[in-house]
Image: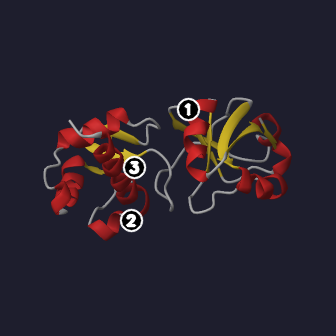
Amino acid sequence: MLELQQEKQLSKWISLILRHSPEQYGIVLDEDAACPINELVQVICQERKWSFVTDEHIRYVVARSDKQRFEIMGDRIRARYGHSRPAIHYEASVPPDVLYHGTSIQAWTIIEKEGLRPMGRRYVHLSEKTDFAELAGKRKGKLVLLKINTAAAVDHIMFYNAGHGVWLCDHIPAECISML
């Protein structure tokens, strides 16, 4: 349906629109941070390179997303997580005792002193499985996997379940983090 490179590029563009700047493209997100798929298609098709994109292409990218970045609800779509500004209201939830985070060796030198912070995003992203953490961390340089002791943090930090093994929080103190 799409070449692998096209699929990745389209996924990144959908992420940009839904996570970071919907208003720049004339997209209005509802209270669940979703918009009609057909509106997203219209925006994407305005770019000559993507003039062929249909609802089916969007659904294909969503279904094949290795990180399950997006969620389709009927005829609406939203980014599950990764927003740079408040978007979705997540209910506080109790996480598993251990979660994981992938990062780079360069970032580890700061994290081990200061803990994990969301940086340019709204939340710190954690995962239930190491393979998901590896996917996220590989983009940042030489991979370092971190083990997060959520049992030690849960009394003073709110955790939110974003679905598909992804957990969010405002920060993680350094004393709750160890390198795998």
Residue at (27, 44) in percent of width and height: 76
Q: Residue 56's x, y, as percent? A: 19, 38
Q: In the image, which disc is placed on residue 21? A: 2
Which one is in front, 129 or 103? 103
Q: Quadrant of the C terminus?
A: top right
Q: Earlier in the sequence, mark 3 or mark 1?
A: 3
Amino acid carrying label 3: it is Asp
Is residue 54 something one can see in this rendering? Answer: yes
Q: Label 2 crowding class (10 Å Cα cut-off): few <14, some 14-19, many 20+? A: some
Q: Earlier in the sequence, mark 3 or mark 2?
A: 2
> Regarding mark 1 in the picture, which secondary structure is present there?
loop
Residue at (56, 32) in percent of width and height: 165
Q: What residue would you read off at disc 3?
A: 32
Residue at (63, 57) in percent of width and height: 118
Which one is in front, 54 or 86? 54
Distance between the alpha carbons at the discs numbered 3 and 2: 16 Å
Residue at (31, 50) in percent of width and height: 10
